[in-house]
Image (cartoon, helix red, strand yellow):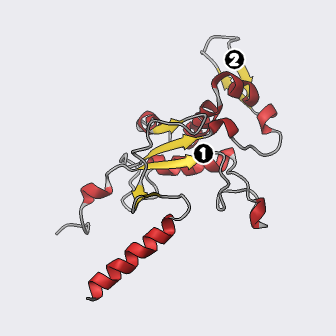
Amino acid sequence: MSQTIGSTRLAYSRVWHHISASAPHPTLSTVKSPPEAVTPPSLGRLASRIAMILMGKHKPIWDPSTDCGDYVVITNCAALYTTGHKKWRKTYYRHNTRPGSLRTITMDVLMDKFGGAEVLRKAVSGMLPKNRLRDRRLARLKAFEGDAHPYKENIIRFGGAKVGETGWEDIVKAVREGDKATISA
């Protein structure tokens, strides 16, 4: 007898999620109250949420040795929100294993040179497990500086509305009420 109920193939299918780095988010914000003071998610909170989606930990079939994560499209990376003085004090290091070749660069210089998408990619990379699946998971992260991106048709929708946008909960409620009426009839 099977240990799963339903189609497992459907559970392993990949979904496209869209997250805006500049939009205020009530659960990922560093300021919780009052509601009008909600900020965009900080770099660390945003990166940890993205890492969870890339690994597939939000799915009930998650397994550490299986790559069952989804695609993530991040827009508005140019407006990444950081708390405190991290933007000017945080340093990134790289070394090519030769003596005296340690190079340092601060976050603001990295953002000017490569954009906010590279800063976010480095943060997410540090939060993923260091194993063979890391590069494949990072390849599913698509980060863009502005609102425009070529994956608009791939973003998950429910009843024609993008999941996460305003009004999609109302569509979910309407569909569920319709399902209840069909089941009871």
Q: Secondary structure at mark 1?
A: helix
Amino acid type, mark 2: Leu
Question: Picture coordinates of residue 58 (x, y %)?
Answer: 46, 58
Q: Specify whether 170 is left or right of 177.
A: right
Q: Residue at x 69, y 17 (%)?
A: 102
Rendered residue at 68%/21% (across/down):
113
Query: Could you say which is closer to the camera, residue 15 or residue 180?
Result: 180
Amino acid identity at mark 1:
Ala
* Mark 1 residue crowding within 10 angstroms, few (<14) / some (14–19) / many (20+): many
In this rendering, the answer to whether 118 lies above or below 71 is above
| Quarter of the image where the N terminus is located | bottom left
Q: How many marks?
A: 2
> Mark 1 vs mark 2: which is more N-terminal?
1
Residue 47 is marked as 1
Task: Return the residue at label 2.
Answer: 102
In space, the residues marked 1 and 2 are separated at their CA atoms by 26 Å
Choose top left, top right, bottom left or bottom right for residue 9.
Answer: bottom left
Q: Nearer the viewer, residue 55 or 171?
A: 171
Looking at the rendered structure, which numbered label has been put on residue 11?
A: none
Q: Look at the picture and state if 154 lies above or below 168.
A: above
Q: Position of residue 105 (x, y in %)?
A: 73, 23
The C terminus - image quarter:
bottom left
